[in-house]
Amino acid sequence: MYKKLIGVVHNLPVRSGDAFSEASLDIYTQVENIEKALKQLGYPSVRIPFTRGVIDFIQRIREEKVEMVFNLCETLDEDPRFAGHPAAVLELLGIPFSGSPSMAIMLTTDKLVTKRLLKAMRIMTPNYLVYDNMSPFYPAVLRFPVIVKPRFEDASIGIDQESIFEDEIGLGKELEGFFNRFGTLLVEEYVAGREFNISIFGYPSPRVLPIAEMDFSGFPKELYHIAGYRAKWEKASFEYRNTSPSFPQELPHDLLKELEITGMVCFCLLMLRDYGRVDVRVDDLRQIHVLEVNANPCLSPDAGFAAAVQQAGMSYTEMVSQLVDFIERRSRNNVRQASHTS
Ligand SMILES: Nc1ncnc2c1ncn2[C@@H]1O[C@H](COP(=O)(O)OP(=O)(O)O)[C@@H](O)[C@H]1O
Ligand SMILES: [Mg+2]
């Protein structure tokens, strides 16, 4: 049977040893594993980087006669603000591709816009202020401790124990430094409590996969329970060795249902497609606070999304096979790629 040529499209990461290179270089792990799975499934594939050199990209796509794309782009030349632009170019070219439409990637890459939409829909998300070194900023309205997060970043870049502040004085001393490194910031009320990752998969009907909980039980009292950069990427760190996702078997039924509904509502609200992950915290009153919504979360075999897929009884290759089916289905039905209802 004829199998279409699939372009595996990815951003170009920083060099090994550069700041945050662990997170950035992970893109190659994703590319290699997707290629391996496609090979097992009998699909020919070609690897094509997406950079600001859009003309070269389009030329490559045409020369190679790429018919479908696996879109793995997380940034554009390391600028997370443009994470959605590769999808936008594919939409313009009319090439069917995996994952969310450009609109969803753009909305969710911007944590400020995401929070505004969540709040407008009365979905709980931690109270916050924006710090851009220009607008009025009155942290007294927030309940401390607070956590400082870059407006546009992912993979816990810029987030660690040092990002949490107990009082205004401590915050005031460090904000400028954070701003100089990461640009506009969100200063968010810290939500203590359990953290869950809600992975969602499927097209045209998405479903919630088994829900993972971050296990911080190995943390000493003086460390905040957060999945910061060290916990996610620095293998030698204490935080990395003492944070692990688990799949709790005995969540109260009501909480499980509420988590599933919250995940699905966010997935639909932000117009995600094929796959996504919603990160939440549950406070002492059992209220669910959405921390962020991830369109196209990392597809490395050792990352949270693949773990949820495996927990659902599906192999990595089967996941890739289904993702190809989702793209095929859209291309068969001639669904307009840019349509958020597609
Ligand atoms: N408001 C908050 N309260 C408590 N912990 C938080 C809060 N915001 C973020 N965190 C911690 O920081 C981690 C990374 O933040 P998140 O918003 O998910 O950004 P990223 O896109 O970098 O994953 C979360 O998994 C959580 O452990
Ligand atoms: Mg997150």
Image: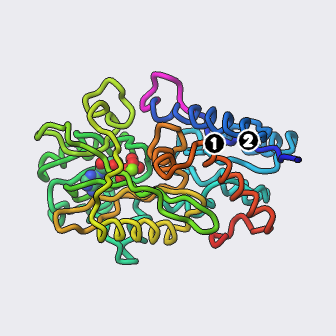
The residue carrying pointer 1 sits among few (fewer than 14), some (14 to 19) or many (20 or more) residues within 10 Å by Cα, namely some
Residue 105 vertical placement versus 222 (above, below): below
Q: Look at label 2 and name its amino acid.
A: Leu
Please report the residue visible at 32 percent of the width from the left and 56 percent of the height from the top: 186
Q: Is residue 254 above or below residue 85?
A: below
Q: Which residue is mark 2?
A: 41
For the point 16% across and 54% down, which residue is it? 145
Q: Is residue 14 left or right of residue 255?
A: right
What is the secondary structure assignment of the residue under circle 1? helix
User: How many numbered circles are shown?
Assistant: 2
Q: Which mark is residue 155?
A: none
Q: Closer to the camera, 292 or 79?
A: 292
- Residue 312 x %, y %: 49, 52
Q: Badge 2 local density, few (<14 within 10 Å), some, or many (20+)?
A: some
The residue tagged 1 is: 317
Confirm or deny contact between disc 1 and disc 2 (CB under 8 A). Answer: yes
Between 301 and 170, which is closer to the camera in this rendering?
301
Specify the segment rendered in magenta: 13-21
On screen, 341 above or below 88?
below
Q: Where is residue 226 shown, x and y percent of the image?
A: 26, 45
Is 14 inside the magenta-drawn segment?
yes
